[in-house]
Amino acid sequence: MVHEEKFFDDQLVLVRMVLGLAQTNTYILGDLKTNSALLIDPAWDGEVIFKEIEKRGWQIQEIALTHAHFDHIGGIAALLKASSSSIPIGMHPADEFIRASGGGAAVYGFTNFDPGPEPSIAYEQGMQIRLGEHRIEVCHTPGHSPGHVIFNLQDAGLVFCGDIIFQRSIGRTDFPGGSTQAIFASIRQEILSLPDETRLLPGHGPETTVGEERRLNPFLTGEFLL
Ligand SMILES: [Zn+2]
Ligand SMILES: [Zn+2]
């Protein structure tokens, strides 16, 4: 399933693909002025993702990882093979121990999982990713994993929030390096501080908004946020 929408006089294109056994959302942001694309969480089926980008005539500027769980990085190795060029990969270094050990794939029975090469860009709080004229801010949001980050495309009121918050749910904190206290702090500081109309594009499931989750998310009531 491929879903597509356009912003800024149709100059910026967002493509969403749902891939792999965890039905992970892979997002491709393409800038039609420069034909460059930011690829967020190449979840699975790297060749399929590559073809989707190639048929639009885009060059992948950077692979941007919200975190290193296998269901978000499982497409990298095949995508790089298909593209036959080197593409920079960005990730927060605190997730490297997860990535290097296969992103937790072995727990789900994937013994030959290939996480791809080591990321070359170390994300940190406040870093800006440039895509044509646009800026995407990186925010460090530990809790689901220690190096989890979200990507904020402020111009469009869009946040790619990975696995920290979902429609009416939040991310698990029982994986290695997870922390319940940290995920609530991250949600409070980096999600609930945003305007209500901000769209949240999560790593799994349908999109939602900050306002909807503020009102309706059962995990975000009273005591959890203190
Ligand atoms: Zn995850
Ligand atoms: Zn996930």
Image (cartoon, rainbow, N blue to C red):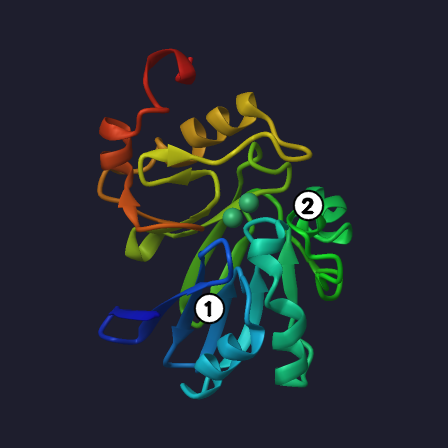
Q: Quadrant of residue 8?
A: bottom left
| Discs 2, 1 touching: Cβ within 8 Å | no
The residue located at (57%, 35%) in the rendering is 142
Residue 116 sits above or below residue 124 on the image: below
Amino acid carrying label 1: it is Leu
Q: Within 8 Å: ligand 2 and the Cβ of disc 1? A: no
Q: Residues within 10 Å of mark 1 (few under 14, many from 20)?
A: many
The residue located at (29%, 71%) in the rendering is 4
Amino acid carrying label 2: it is Val
Residue 21 sits above or below residue 75 on the image: above
Q: Quadrant of residue 9?
A: bottom left
In the image shown, does 215 or 6 lie closer to the viewer? 215
* Of the image marks 2 and 1, the number of the one nearer the N terminus: 2
Q: Quadrant of residue 217?
A: top left
**x and y percent of residue 131 in the render?**
46, 68
**x and y percent of residue 128 in the render?**
52, 55
- Circle 1 — which element? strand
Farthest residue, direction front: 109
Distance between the alpha carbons at the discs numbered 2 and 1: 36 Å
Q: Which mark is residue 75?
A: none
Work out which quarter of the rendered image holds the C terminus and state it: top left
In the image shown, does 211 or 104 lie closer to the viewer? 104
Q: Residues within 10 Å of mark 2 (few under 14, many from 20)?
A: few
Residue 201 sits above or below residue 189 on the image: below
The residue located at (47%, 25%) in the rendering is 184
The residue at which mark 2 appears reads as 107
- Circle 2 — which element? helix
Q: Judge depth for marks 2 and 1 and give the one in front.
A: 2
* 6 sits to left or right of 71: left
* 11 sits to left or right of 118: left
The residue at which mark 1 appears reads as 131
